Image (spheres, coloured by chain):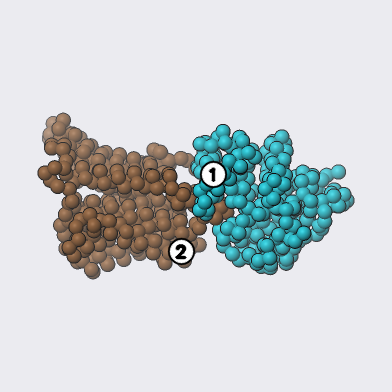
Chain colours: A cyan, B brown
Amino acid sequence: MAALLEVMGLKAFYGQTQSLYDVGFEIPTGGITTLLGANGAGKTTTLRAICNMVRTDGTIRFDGKNIRGMATEEIVRHRIAHVPEGRGTFTTLTVDENLRIAAYTRKDKQAVKDELERVFTYFPRLKERIQQQAGTLSGGEQQMLAIARALMLNPRLMLLDEPSFGLAPLIVLEIFRILRRINEEEKVSILLVEQNAALALDLATHAYVLETGRVVMSGPSDVVKNDENVRKSYLGY
Amino acid sequence: MEQLIQQIASGLANGAIYACVALALVMIYVSTDHINFAQGEMAMFSAYISWQLMSWGMSFWVAFVLTVLISFAMGVLIERLILRPLHNAPVLSIIVVFIGLLAIFNSMAGAFWSYLIKEFPSPFPKSSFGIGGVIGPHQLGVVVVTLIVLGMLFVFFRYTPLGLAMRAAAQNPQMARLVGVRVDWMLALGWGLAASVGAVAGIMVAHIVYLEPNMMGGILLYAFASALVGGISNPAGAVAGGFIVGILENMVAYAGNQIEKATGIYIIGNGEKLTVALIIVIFVLTVKPAGLFGRVVVKRV
């Protein structure tokens, strides 16, 4: 399987501070890959680097094309959807507006309508709340809205930053079930950053472990899951 | 009683002007967190442009539409050429730029058209417009034009994809980029729209205060007061604030006149209107910093 996203020798900087030193990984087309690591290891920064939201150096190739240094809004047009940490919704806009804004770049009105209906099959709860302000939704619903909005971009690759953050365990399970369906039914490849390593390793086929801005280990999820260091550091048994 | 109604009606007309300028201020504030001190002078400059177009023989409404379009382009250009390079500059630098723009527009208008006071026509026919004894033709016209402009803006922001993208860019620029909105252009469009709304206010008020380079000075202060009363981050609030301030200042003057008539003691009158506006600003800032319709922003630290 050809790699959809190839990252090589990626460095990232916040002002003078370097936070990624040498990050490299590949995401196979149609797969789910997870980035694991402790707080501050550079997981979120890696996602932000892919979308050019921090200063970067190195190579980021998407579908064979170098996208490093492109403006964020252009990268989105290449069908990479980023769901940022902390429920990235427009809180003062309604659910409907939050979803329609993602289709703002698209001309075909009928396709957008169909897409909206399809998105609602994954998130029926959002349909009930369609005229509500996003800020009045529960945490879980906001996270669902953020994922639904990413889906409205008709992405080939979805970057997810800690979708489980601050949510009740049952909601988290529901969201992860939906993510698996999205991956299988919509053929969307997924790059998942997650604190909950056990959950992430169950969903993902491949895993990379980051430590202070470098990849220290990688492999199929089953292998990583059974690695003693990973078990001790991230799985806690 | 008739005098009271007249005062309220003329307050509405003034309020409509304040509402437009306040809205222009708020439109830029919500997307950039800056108050454009040059908003009033830009409106004044627009009024001169329409005067120039009319003196070249255009009819009022042709000049009006053309001026609104020119002002839009002017707003976009100012954002792109002057403010874009400063988007990471400290707030004080930007304030200095705004004050610089204020001075530049003021002296350019003086240089091009001289500081002599000019008369500015009203497009509203005296015979058929206005309600006798209540509101004059121009005053009624100002209110109507303002309401049409505000209505169009409301429809634009609420129901068009571009309006939605502009609201999204103002609310959360980074997230807007992540859904493909070209945020930089949205800011420039916001500047253009603000300049256009300001132009409407400038053209409408020029007949009342006469055309001269300093004509918007006092009005900008009233607009600040309006925006603050309504809540500086709330466009609808700014509009409401404009009408409130417009009526309030006339009510204060009216009350002052009544007191003087009854007791012979002069306390407050027309001359103190601006003072009243400034007292409103200070009062709102101390008692209700978020304004009547504003929301208190609570930040977790």
Residue located 71% across and 43% down the image = A181
Q: Which residue is mark 2?
A: B84
Instruction: Left or right? Give the position of B69 relative to A200.
Output: left
Which amino acid type is shown beneath numbered disc 2? Arg
| Secondary structure beneath label 2 | helix
Task: Locate residue A62, reporting x and y percent.
Answer: 67, 62
Q: Are marks 1 and 2 in contact (CB under 8 Å)?
A: no
Other-residue count near label 2 (Cα within 10 Å), few / some / many at <14 / 14–19 / ≥20: some
Q: Does residue A161 appear left or right of residue B172 in this picture?
A: right
Q: Where B33 sits versus B78, above or below?
A: above
Asked whether A107 or B180 is in front, the reply is A107
Query: Residue A113's mark?
Result: 1
Which residue is rendered at x = 78% and y = 53% of the image? A207
Q: Position of residue A224 (x, y in %)?
A: 84, 52
Looking at the rendered structure, the kind of residue marked 1 is Lys
Tag on residue B59? none
- The residue at the point 41 percent across, 55 percent down is B190
Q: Is residue A120 visible?
A: yes
Q: Chain of mark 1?
A: A
Q: Nearer the observer, disc 1 or disc 2? A: 1
Relative image position of residue B221 (x, y in whole percent): 30, 50
Residue A172 in sight from this viewpoint: no
Q: Residues within 10 Å of mark 1 (few under 14, many from 20)?
A: few
Say which chain tag 2 marks: B
Taking depth in this image into account, of A79 and B114 the one nearest to the observer is A79
Q: Is residue B58 left or right of residue B40?
A: left
